[in-house]
Image (spheres, rainbow, N blue to C red):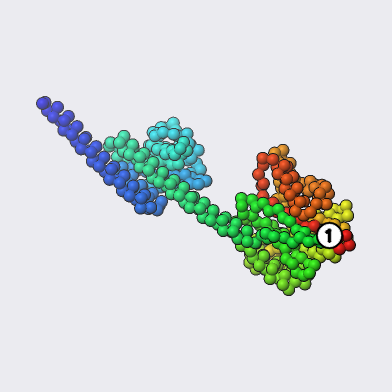
Amino acid sequence: MTDGGSIQAVNQLRQLERELLLKQMQIQRLLNITQAINSNMSADDLFNMYREFLRFEMGMSRILLLIQEVDHWKLAVEFNLEKKYTAEALVPILRNITNLYTVKATDEEILHEFDIVIPVYHKEHPISYALVTVANKEDLYHKIQFIQTITNIVAVAIENKRLFKNQMEQERMNKEIELAREVQSLLIPQTFPRSKNFELSSIYKPHFNVGGDYFDYIRIGEDRYLICMADIAGKGVSAALLMSNLQGNLRQLARQYTDPEQLVIQLNEAVFALTGGDRFLTLFIAEVQPARGRIDYINCGHISPILYSADRVEYLSKGTTVLGAFPKLPFIEHGLIRVEDPTILLVFTDGLTDLVNASHQYFEIENLEKFVRDFHGESAEAFNQRLMIDLEKFKGNQTFPDDITVLTCKIVPNAVS
């Protein structure tokens, strides 16, 4: 063998040794990163490991790593950069790079500090971009290929962490919703009074199984009932807890009930003490004396109930503002209704009039008034059954956009019973 051949053979042998050492190092680094991921190393520690590996073992003099978060991009790793970068400036340019890319002089100036761009995709969506500048260009091809592999592993691991966190959060929310639903089911009355003078019936369709609507009735005397409906701001456990607090206070105060005005003042103080003004609720509350045909009510910012009697419609709007927003109610107006004929009182939340059909038409209050005029002669239960059929027909294939709650009261004074 000639000297030239010997030199070539030695060089080839040395090249193979370098490649072997590089492969051994890469395998060891893969093992280290895999172990770190399996041991649930924090994202910050994983990024630190990634940065140090690219610096010392891959010979990268500048490093920038962008990671996709839930609704934004994050600069996860920055090393030895001359300029200040933002994800907002980089990502629109990087979105056009779908494969391993060598930066050219003709590219956007923002990329000129780097040599290579390494995009990482997951199911056709970018989840990471690594931008590097190479100090030691020996075995560059193999290094870049391995950096691409490591970046992919780290980016997917971070994505999996995010997805797992989202899954845990979703499970927590599902448990919250189930708890709220259970609490709510205990607060909503399941049976209603039914006599020759008085009948109650309800429709209750909470949105996503947990709503912010509450209704109740309390018998406070031989011919005296308190009926109420509330629409609580918000959903979920917080709304259910506020609902539970409202019911507890209402039932406690009903034991010493004197008039609706004093009851509303005390309820407002209780709600404000609990929420500090951060949460509020609308409320309609009325004392009904069916045999006497008397209704004393206060409307606290609630959508006005409809009362139909003697071929006349009246909206019960007298009252005050929402409960819980102020430590003291700024004003209270007490409403009094006397009826001598069979009467329908329809109390509902705004989810009813927010119902939209496929033609983007709302189930407006005029629709509800017409329905009351047409079917006021029905019993409370039959009235609600017809109303539910009408609502289903109106919305068609559309979903209910909000809680729908209806409390129908049929009042027959003794003079006509």
Q: Residue furthest bottom?
A: 256
Vertical order, 35 against 146 (above or below): below
Residue 76 point in image, percent of width and height: 43, 48
Residue at point 36%, 50% (across, down)? 38
Vertical order, 213 against 78 (above or below): below
Q: Is residue 259 left or right of residue 396?
A: right
Residue 113 visible in the shown view = no
Q: Nearer the viewer, residue 84 or 215?
A: 215
Residue at point 37%, 43% (across, down)? 153
Residue 347 point in image, percent of width and height: 76, 56
Instruction: Please tell me how many numbered marks the rendered image carries.
Output: 1
Q: Nearer the viewer, residue 342 or 24?
A: 342
Vertical order, 56 against 245 (above or below): above
Tag 1 secondary structure: loop
Vertical order, 231 against 127 (above or below): below
Circle 1: residue type: Val
Quadrant of image for the N terminus = top left
For label 1, the residue is: 412
Residue at point 50%, 41% (across, down)? 89
Residue 399 visible in the shown view = yes
Residue 95 point in image, percent of width and height: 48, 36
